Amino acid sequence: QVHLVESGGGLVQPGGSLRLSCAASGINFRLYDMEWYRQAPGKERELVAGISSGNTANYADFVEGRFTVSRDNVRNRLFLQMDTLKPEDTAVYYCHVRARARDFWGRGTQVTVSS
C-alpha cells in the first residue's frame, strides 16, 4: 500500500520560509517522479513543483524562483523549501505520486502566510 505523509506546514509571516517534507512508503521511491500540489479554499488543486526520478525539477510559474523541490532517495522523502512566502501561498500542500496506474495523495499539510 502506497502511503504519503506530509509535514512541516504552519503559520508564517509574509517573507518567511517553511520546509515541507513528505515521507513515502510502499513504493520503490527512487523510481518515481514526485510532485507537490496545493489547494487554497475555493480553488482547484494546482501543481506547485515536481521532481523526476532523474532529479530534474520543474515549477509552476507562480513559484518565481522562491521554492526548491528536492528528494532523498535513501530516506524516501520529498521536500519543498519555500522562501519569500506570500499570503497567496496560503493553502493545503499535498504530496503526490502516480504509481501502478493510480494517483496517490497524502492528507496534506496546511500552510498559512499571514501577518
Image (tube, rainbow, N blue to C red):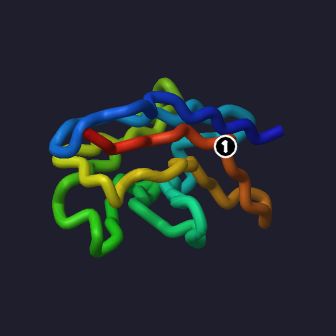
Instruction: Identify the residue shown where x is 49% and y is 25%.
Output: 75
83 and 3: which is toward the camera? 83
- Whether residue 56 is visible, yes or no, is no
Residue 76: x, y in percent?
53, 32
105 and 71: which is toward the camera? 105
50 and 13: which is toward the camera? 13
Residue 71: x, y in percent?
40, 40
9 and 106: which is toward the camera? 9
- Whether residue 10 is visible, yes or no, is yes
Relative to 3, 14 lies left or right? left
Q: Quadrant of the N terminus?
A: top right
Q: Does 7 appear above or below 86?
A: above
Q: How many numbered discs sit on the rendered protein?
A: 1
User: Where is mark 1, residue-wise?
Assistant: 106
Residue sitting at the far top: 75
For badge 1, the amino acid type reads Gly
Instruction: Identify the residue shown where x is 30% and y is 34%.
Output: 12
